[in-house]
Image (cartoon, grey):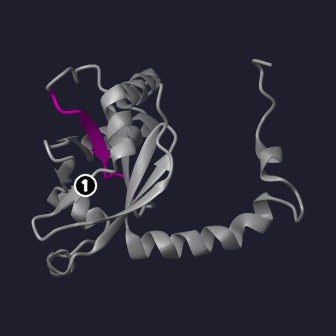
Amino acid sequence: MSEAFRGEFNQKVDSKARVSIPAAFRRALQAGDPGCTDGTRPKFVIVYGDDGRRFLECYTMSGIKRIERLVRLLPLGTPKRRYMERNMITMSLIAEVDEEGRIVLPPKAREKIALSVEEMKEGVETTFAGALESFQIWKRSTYEADQVGAAADEPAILAPGQDMLALLPDDPGV
C-alpha cells in the first residue's frame, strides 16, 4: 500500500450514526481500493470481531484481501481457522464512504464500541487511530482510557532511557 494510516483524529457521530472519515484516511482508502476509479467512492472493511478488542479495525479492500489469503492458508476445520473466519470474516462488513466523506456506523459496529443512541443524540466523539495498514475507530473516552493504560505498560517494553527506535528490527534491505 502506498499510503499508510497515521495520526489520530476525533470525529463526532451524529444522531443518524454518521461519522466523517478523516481526509488523510480517505486518500489511503481510495489508494487501497482497486475498484475505486474516478467517480466512485472507496469501500473498506470494518471488523468488529474479537471480544478482547474495544475498537473497530478497518482495512482497505486490498488489505483485507491479504488477510483473507492468510486465513485460507490455515488448514480447514482447525480451531485457528474457525477463530479467524469468525472474527475476521463473519464479524465484518463492507462500508462505503459517501459523497460527503462519511460512513454510517452499522448497529453491530456501534454495539462493539458501546455507542448508545442517547450519546449519538448528544454528539459523542470517536477517535480514528492510524495503524499503518489499518485504522481503528474507538469511542473517544475508551481510547483515552486505553492510552493511559498503554503508557503504564511502557516500562515493561522499553527500558528507562532507551530510545523507542531500538525496538525495531534491523532493516534487511539496508
Whether residue 79 is in magenta: the answer is no
Q: Whole-percent x and y of residue 144?
A: 49, 73
Query: Closer to the camera, 30 or 117?
Result: 30
Residue under the point 59% across and 75% down: 148
Residue under the point 25% across and 55% down: 20
In the picture, measured across the screen, residue 59 lies left or right of residue 169, that is: left
- The total of numbered circles placed on residues is 1
| Residue type of the residue flagged with mark 1 | Ser
Picture layout, residue 147 above or below residue 25: below
Picture layout, residue 85 above or below residue 37: below
Secondary structure under badge 1? strand
Picture layout, residue 74 above or below residue 120: above
Circle 1 packing at 10 Å, graded few (<14), some (14-19), many (20+), is: many
Q: Picture quarter containing residue 51? A: bottom left
Quadrant for the C terminus, please. top right
* Most distant residue in the right direction: 161
Q: Whole-percent x and y of residue 7?
A: 50, 52
Residue 107 visible in the shown view: yes
Q: Whole-percent x and y of residue 134?
A: 44, 41
Residue under the point 23% across and 64% down: 110
User: Which portion, as a residue range, is magenta?
Assistant: 40-51
Please name the residue that numbered disc 1 is placed on. Answer: 20
* Most distant residue in the left direction: 16
Q: Whole-percent x and y of residue 124?
A: 27, 75
Residue under the point 24% across and 58% down: 109
Q: Picture quarter containing residue 166? A: top right
Residue 32 visible in the shown view: no
Whether residue 44 is in magenta: the answer is yes
